[in-house]
Image (cartoon, coloured by chain):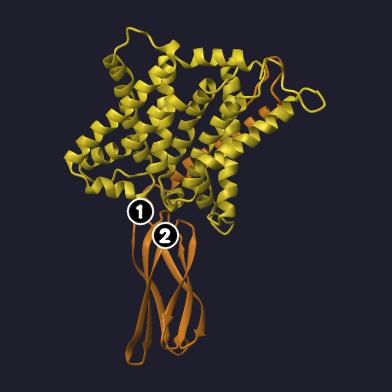
Amino acid sequence: MPRESTGQASRWEWVSAGVSTVLVAAIAGFLIQQGISQRGGMPHIVVSADSIARVGDQYRVEFWATNSGNATAAALHVEGELRGDTGAVETSGVDIDYVPAGARRKAVLWFTHDPRTLHLQIRPTGNDLP
Amino acid sequence: MTAARAAGPAGDERSPDRLFAIGVARAFGAAILFSLPLLMTMEMWSLGFYMNRLRLALLMVAIVPLLIGVDHYSGFKETATWLGDAVDAMVAYGVGIVTSGVILTVLGIVNLEMPLREIVGKVALQAVPASFGAVLAASQLSGGDRAGGEDGGNTGDGKRSGYRVGLLFMLAGAVFLAFNVAPTEEMILIAFGMTPWHGLVLMALSLLLMHGFVYAMEFRGAPQRHPGVSGTALFLRFTVVGYAISLAVSAYVLWTFGRFGDEAMAMHVMKTIVLAFPASLGAAAARLIL
């Protein structure tokens, strides 16, 4: 900061320096606490369908992938399966780049059959650990 | 600008508050300028939420002495106390945090629906290069229109010609360049594709280019050059030491980002050499620029 040869530094300098120091210390402390409490954590993914809509001649299923675990899931693959009386009718899959720990991501599956008339099961089938 | 104090339009002297506000504005500008490429790099966003929390905390704390050191020796400051430099460094850090938070929010990389862990991680990581830019602006760009500019300039030059100061600047330059390159996936892909011969040639090239910078630096500021200093001494004292600093910085940054996976030592070495290439050029250039 500019410092006059004879004048004092602005008191706002001290205020902002103090606030910054507290902020940095708080962030570092938060990170340390997170780091210690989440050692060796693994992602835990739960998928829940959100809405189903017909778009043209396709059906769009929106779902949330929620990671309640302590680590990030990368390249998460989610499979949706439509089952009827005769067995599996149709499957669709999607890859989600990242679902951070404690976060959720929304994604979409497309089907040619109406999911509302069949039994829909969406589940995560695998993920990478970044 | 002579030794007259900076004067406003009515002939009043600028108050410390106003000078501080101007300095902070400059710091924000420099923070954005220095960190914008990284702010728009997606690997930085995901590192923000998946990189090791403890290593990120260590990084946050480790740059504080570097900021203080750079603030002390850079620019045309009057000789200031270390406490004053610490104050400046923390203000720059605060500017870096705010800059990162604002830009990431405006770009939609951060929003309130995200968990706190994700927001804090992204902002904290981006604050590192941003605060770096801020601290350089605070001391460097404000030098032009300050009281005692000429005397302060000579004092600054005298202060800045020490060997340890040169090492500090090299360290700062290496850190900045390494940080800019390390997060990206391309860096690792380059290392994967190189043979040991590539590695050797790259090391030699790094040393050669560094020495070119160092040599030009020594000839630039004539008063600092001792007639008896040979190119070899220069090479050993600055170039080789600077390259060693760059290697150490590169290894630290790679470790921080978790880039040393379960691989053979040869691959760790290769990654370090690859990252040390831009880091060493940053180190050499920093002595010329700062």
Give the residue type that dot 1 points to: Pro
Task: Locate residue B165, reporting x and y percent.
Answer: 44, 18
What residue sits right under mark 1 in the picture?
A: A130
Q: Which chain is orange?
A: A
- Seen from the viewer's position, the closer of residues A35 and B154 is B154
Q: Name the residue under label 2.
A: A98
In the rendered image, which quarter is residue A9 located in?
top right
Letter of the chain in yellow: B
Q: Report whether residue A10 is seen.
A: yes
Secondary element at tag 2: strand
Determine the residue positioned at 39% across, 12% down. Answer: B225
The answer to which of marks 2 and 1 sits earlier in the sequence is: 2
Residue A78, percent from left and from top = 38, 71
Disc tally is: 2
Disc 2: host chain: A
Residue B155: x and y in percent read 55, 12
Q: Indicate whether A100 appears above or below B248.
A: below
